[in-house]
Image (cartoon, rainbow, N blue to C red):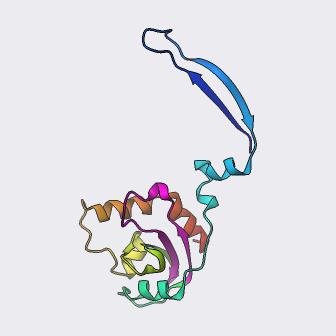
Amino acid sequence: MVIAAASLTLPACGGADEATPATTRETTTEADATTDPETAAESLPCKKPPQIAIENISLGLIRGGTLLAAKYVEVPASLQKGPGWPEWLIAARIKGAVGIWATSRNAGGSIFAIDEVSRMYTDWGTAASPDSPARDMMDTLAFSDAASAVVACVGG
């Protein structure tokens, strides 16, 4: 990947009216490719969650079914807006659809159903009121690149 970067010299107060280009450089590195926001979701590795995580999520099943082909990705630090935010997004097939749950490592702490499928089949996070910090977290994660990446992990 080739990345062109230009820096601008901005005038101090009372200086010239326009910013002028200072330098332009091109670099090609693997590190740059993995930090590009466009490809960030593609760089999140899919991992198989421990069985205890699946069992803990399954405790909230309200319509029967079994979680199949589960995978997880770690929630990027840029999405964690403070202490208590989930560290993993786990996706699994259930009755032909794919659901996403947000949780701490191993699903040992709070578990949140963050998409329509997971909310349909489990009761995790249903108590979160529309204007609550928990609902804000659920919505933020549901529409994130990490959520898209974990769904792709299970072929959804």
Percent x, y of residue 112:
37, 73
Q: What residue is shown at x 74% (from left), y 40% (from top)?
A: 2
Percent x, y of residue 146:
52, 62
Q: What residue is shown at x 40% (from left), y 69% (from top)?
A: 114
Image: 40 above or below 18: below
Image: 6 above or below 76: above
Magenta-span inclusion, residue 92: yes
Q: Is residue 31 left or right of residue 64?
A: right
**Rendered-image quadrant of the N terminus:** top right
**Which sits in the foreground, 113 or 47?**
47
Percent x, y of residue 78:
48, 54
**Rendered-image quadrant of the C terminus:** bottom right
**Which sits in the foreground, 49 or 31?**
31
> Magenta segment, which residues?
69-96
Percent x, y of residue 72:
55, 73
Q: What residue is shown at x 59% (from left), y 55% (from top)?
A: 40
Q: Is residue 15 left or right of residue 125?
A: right
Q: Is residue 153 left or right of residue 54?
A: right
Q: What residue is shown at x 39% (from left), y 65% (from top)?
A: 85
Q: Is residue 126 left or right of residue 96?
A: left
Image: 40 above or below 149: above
Q: How many marks?
A: 0
Magenta-span inclusion, residue 63: no
